[in-house]
Image (tube, grey):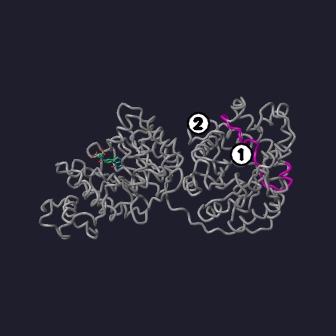
Amino acid sequence: MDSPFRQALAERVIVLDGAMGTSIYERDLDVETDFCGCENCPEALLLRRPDVIEQIHHDFLEAGADAVETDTFGAMKHVLAEFDLQDRCFELSKQATEIARAAADAHSTSDKPRFVIGSLGPGTKLLTLGQQTWDVMLDSYAEAARGIIAGGADAIVLETCQDLLQIKCGINAVLKALDDAGRTPEDLPILVSVTIEQTGSMLVGSSIEAAAAALRDYPITSLGLNCATGPTEMGEYIHFLSRRWDRTISVVPNAGLPALVEGRTEYPLGPRDFAEQMLAFVQRDGVGIVGGCCGTTPEHIRLLAQGVADTTPATRKVTPQAPSCTSTYQPVEYRQDQSFLIVGERCNASGSRKFKRLLEEEDWDGIVSLAREQVRAEGAHVLDVNVDYAGRDNAKDMAEVVSRLVRQVDAPLMIDSTQIATIEAGLKHAPGKCIINSANFEDGDEKFDQICRLAKTYGAGLVIGTIDEDPEAAMARTADRKLSIAERAIERAINVHGLNEHDIFIDPLVLPISTGMDQDRRSALELVEGTRRIAEKHPAVQLICGLSNVSFGLKPVARVVLNSVLLDELTNAGMTSAIVHAGKILPLARIDEAQRLAALNLVYDRRDASVGGTGLPTHDQRPAYAEGVDA
Ligand code: THG
C-alpha cells in the first residue's frame, strides 16, 4: 500500500517549501516575549507565537509549494534539553506538525494535494566524534518522530545530515516510532538529505559515494542534499546520485553560497537564478524533490513551482553502485578487479602478539598505527578488528578501538567477535558500512537470527561460517557439509531477514592442515572444493576465509608459502576475499618452484609425494576435482 505522498512522487516533481529558519529570523521577534527566552530555538515559538509558523507555512503554500516542512528541526529531546524543554519533545513535535497539517489541508485541492513533511535536523552533537551515545540519540529522535507521526505528517525527512552514524541512528529511531504507531515506511516514507560542505564531503568526512553505499539498504524513499551551498556547488553530487541512486533524489540548496556582509549572513542567489539552476537538475538529472534551504523566500518557491510545472524531468538511467562496504570516507567494492578483497588480520587480540600487547597497555595510538600500517604498507582493503580477550571488558574495548579507527583510518571495518554485545558496541561507533564477523548455527537459529538483525539495524555486511549444531562435527569438514550449511545460511539470511545476497560472506572455514592428525590432512582440499561448489551455485554471494589458520604450527617461512599457494588455489576456485597478513602473501612468481609444489602436495593431500621438492608431482596426481585449477 503506497502512501499518497509516494504516489505523488511517482507522478511528478514535488516542490518543497523554502527556509524556515531564515524566514523566522527575518521577522522582528523578541527573544524574551516571542521565544520565551530561548534564543536560537525555533521550536520555542510554538509556545506563544504559533501564528508565526502558521504564516510561514501559508506563505510557501500560497507560493505553490506541494509540501511544507514542520517547525521541528531541533525538536529532538537532546536539543530541546539545551533550553530545558526536553519534557515537551512529543508535545511540541505534535503541535508543530498539526500546524503544518492544518495549513496544508487548507490549501489542498483534488488536483493539487499538499503534504506535510516532518523535519528532523542533525542536532548539535556528532555521534561519530563521541559527543553523544547511539542509545541517547536513538531515544531522542524516536520521541520527536512519535510527535510528528501523531501530528499527522505524510513523510519524515532527516535533513542537514552531517554524520552517517547519526543518519543510521535517526532511521532506526523513525522505524521504531513508526512501528510503535502501527505504521510502516511504505505508508509514511522516510527521506534522507545530507549536507555536503564546500570541502566536498560531509562534516565528518564522508563522500556522497560513501553515503549512498552506506544508506542504500535502509528503507528510505529518497536521498539528496540540502544546506551549506547553493545549487551550483551541488551539481557534481546530484549528478552522481542521478546515475547511481536508484530511488528518488532531492535537491534543497541555499539561495547561493552564504556570504558575511556587515556582520549579517546574506544569500546572494535571487529567485530567478535560483529557479533556473534548480530546473536544470530536473531536466538534466531527473530529480524528484526540489525545494529551498537557508535564504530562500516564497518568491524563490513561486518561480520554482511555476518552472517545474512547465519542465519535463529527465528519464534517468541508473547503474547502481557495485556492492561495497565503506570506511567513514569512501566505499570499497567487495569484488576487486585484479585481486581478492584483502582483509588485514592483525588487529586481533588472539591473532597478533603486538595487538594484544597494545590492547593490554591501552595504547590506542599504537593500535591506530598498526591499523594504518596494514592499509598503507601492506595493501589491506578492509581491517578485521577482534578484541576478544579474557579478563577485559570486550565491548568497551571494541567501542574504544572502533571509534578511533573510523576517524583515523580510511578503511572499512570487519567487526569480529563471538559475542553479540561486543559486535554491537563496535557497530554503534562506525559511521560507514561495516562487515560483521561472524554468524553461524553453532548455537542454533536464535543467535544466528540476532546477528542477522544487527546487520539490518546497523546496515552491515555479514560473514557466516559453515558451522552448525551437530555436536559430532560442528565445523563442516567436508565440501558437502560446507555447501549444505552455506545454503541453509543464505536461505535464512535472505528470506527471513531480508539481507542482500551480495552482502553475505560465506566462510567455508580453514582448519590447520598439519596438526599430525589424519582427519586434518584433507582440510585444505575440502575447503578448495567447498569454495568451488558454493561459488558455482551462489555466484552473487561473497566467499571469505581466515587464511592464516591453515598453517598454524608451521615455521614462519613455510607459512608464507603455504598461505600464498592455498590462496591462489582458493581464488581460482571462486574465493573473493580473505583475512590475511597482507604483507606476507607472495605472488606465485616469487615462490621457489619446489616449495610451491610441496605446498600444493600439502593442500591436495598427496601423501605419496615427498614434501620438500624431490619427485615433483605432475598435474595427473592431483585429485579429479582439482582439474582446471591453474596451479
Ligand atoms: N574466519 C573468520 N574470521 C576469522 C578467522 C576465520 N578471524 C580470526 C582468524 N580466523 C583470522 N585471523 C588470524 C589472525 C592471525 C593469525 C591467524 C588468523 C596468525 N597469527 C600468528 C600466530 O598465531 O601464529 C601470530 C602473529 C603475531 O603474533 O604477529 O596466524 O577463519 N571469518
**Residue at 41% from the left image edge and 37% from the top image edge:** 363
Q: Mark 2 highlights which residue?
A: 132
Q: Earlier in the sequence, mark 2 or mark 1?
A: 1
Q: Is residue 76 magenta?
A: yes
Query: Would residue 5 appear left or right of 414 to someone viewing this image?
Result: right
**Residue at 87% from the left image edge and 40% from the top image edge:** 28
Q: Residues within 10 Å of mark 2 (few under 14, many from 20)?
A: some
Q: Position of residue 161 (x, y in %)?
A: 64, 48
Amino acid found under the numbered disc labelled 2: Gln
**Residue at 73% from the left image edge and 57% from the top image edge:** 230
Looking at this view, is 351 or 522 the one in front? 351
Looking at this view, is 613 or 366 the one in front? 366
Closer to the eye: label 2 or 1 = 2
Q: Mark 1 highlights which residue?
A: 119
Q: Residues within 10 Å of mark 1 (few under 14, many from 20)?
A: many
Query: Would residue 465 appear left or right of 265 to someone viewing this image?
Result: left
Which structural element holds mark 2? Answer: loop
Q: Quadrant of residue 243?
A: bottom right
Amino acid found under the numbered disc labelled 1: Ser
Q: Is residue 438 visible?
A: no
Stretch of the chain drawn in magenta: 58-78
Looking at this view, is 354 or 445 the one in front? 354
Q: Is residue 265 magenta?
A: no
